[in-house]
Image (cartoon, grey):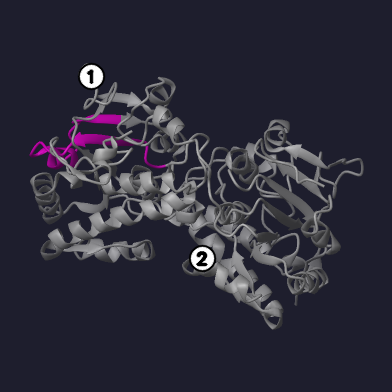
Amino acid sequence: MAGRKDGKIWVDGLTTQFTGQSLSSLDLVESERDHPTIPVLPDLWVVKIGGQSVMDRGAEAVKPIVEELVAARKAGTHLLVGTGGGTRARHAYAIGLDLGMPTAMLARIGGSVPVQNARMIQMLTAKDGGIMCYPEDFEKLPLFLQLGTIPIMSGMPPFEFWEKAPRVGRIPANRTDAGVYLIAEFFGAKGVLYIKDEEGLYTDDPKKNPDATLIPEITARELLESGQDDIVVERAVLEYLERSRSVKEVRILNGLKKGNVTRALNGEAIGSVIRSSKA
Amino acid sequence: MTEESTASKLITGDGRTHVGSGLMRESLVSAKLMAETDAGEIRPMVPDMTMVAIGGSSIMDRGADAVLPLTKEIAALNRDGHKLVLGVGGGARARHTLAIGLGLGLPLGGLARIVGGVEEQNRDMLQFILAPEGAVTLIKDDFQDLQLFLSKGMIPVTIGQPPYHFWEPPPKEGWLPENGPDVGLFLMAEIFGAPSMVFVKDVDGVYDKDPNRHDDAQKIDRISATELLERNLHDLPVEREVVRCLVNSRLLTSIVVINGRKPEQLRDFLEGRPVGTLIHNHRYVEKEG
């Protein structure tokens, strides 16, 4: 039978370490207890196919990359493939900004383009087991993987109307790089690959600055503190890497060079790796 | 920014097919570009609504004693024409969920995925109580139908937990999801474009220390979000992340924390009388008169 505790309706067993205190209490923040986290899918590779860098190049870029992913899946690698948005997302953002839309509305409309791209990859890979994986489907991933399928998702996190206003500007801070990283962090994934059209991370945008040089390895903190203006992945990924519990590094590679995706999935140190400074 | 002549046209030549726009070829990572998108007016979506966030632990867990007088006041306010959206948190069962989940070693995104389940119970109870007055449940898929509900005098009731689910970002401090129901309802009010929202708790506002434990606790009538964060108070009646969100928010420039055990405070808030604690950001403009 229910009783009362501090004026609240209470039942036996409901009391825990969080009872009677606000979850925003500093006591909770300061109690640096170790909470070991179980790996949910530790054999999973989470791979993002770039929007502007790969999808917008069309068949010439997309098809060889998809072939490598299919071959890896056939060889037994567990893959979850995410897609970026690219130029159509930028066009939609540009119109939305012009119309005075807030960040969360931009996040909502920007999310449609990576879904289009994911569906394109699904159609290309259907005969080899490509299936669409929506946020509601993620609890079925173990089944999909054991059946030898290639689950394909939009890279965008499902924040939509709940995307927070950034400190400066109106473009959503969490886009497809962040979404792919966060889902990998939840799964405790084996690795995260960003397939782009440059060798990796450069000191500046190599498409605009010919003097930019490749950075093969750096910590997220160093990169955040460097003041570098243009970075090959979203800044949110760097911030999350520094606070992560499971996935402590991400790799950026050039998917336009045949064999690179396969090499990275085999564990070769190609492209650039960005690590958490707390790794 | 792109030339007028290329706007919205397909542009090739660098191996990619672009759609001409001011953001064409941009990585969207550049801080300079972010600053360029900062300017300009932001439009609201449903600005005459008011989000009423009802505490799970502070109100719902008290049962009929606290819930019924509050819902009676809400029904009266709705009849007076106030367009209200009710949101609710989880309370004791949410804390129990987190405690068990944490003990099982579930990752952060897993905790965020399950914790909203108890809010759905609270939402359904509130909707049931207020159904004779026109309460309906509001879920994510019906978001863009809000005007339909409000124009018919209905009272939409929603859960607070934002749908970050497995994608919950690692917290800036501590080891629990930092985006709880208060954050979710704040962000909903922000996208609707309401200039203010109210958090209905069981204290008269924000105090310099927990008023339930310290007799000499002093109530703060009004404070900026930045100052509140700097003061780093030991206890806050709202999630700390809400105050961080308020620092950057554009249309929702203030929040008010009131005591739902005194339902008349809700009327005071909606009729523009000073009540509870007002927390505001640098964009906040005081109403005339």
User: Residue B143 bears which disc, if any?
Assistant: 2
As drawn, the residue found furthest toward the bottom would be B132
Determine the chain carrying the residue at label 2.
B
Image vertical order of residue B28 relative to residue B93, above or below: above
* Image location of residue B24, percent across then percent down: 28, 38
Mark 2 secondary-structure assignment = helix
Q: Residue at x 67, y 52 (%)?
A: A17
The magenta segment: A246-273
Quadrant of residue A226 in the image? top left
User: In 3D space, how far apart are the residues under numbered discs 1 and 2 (Cα atoms)?
Assistant: 47 Å
Dot 2, crowdedness within 10 Å: few (<14), some or many (≥20)? Answer: few
- Residue that mark 1 sits on: A213
Q: State which mark lies toward you, 1 or 2.
A: 2
* Image location of residue B265, percent across then percent down: 83, 59
Dot 1, crowdedness within 10 Å: few (<14), some or many (≥20)? Answer: some
Residue kind at label 2, given as amino acid type: Phe
Q: Is residue B149 visible?
A: yes
* Image location of residue B252, percent across then percent down: 63, 48
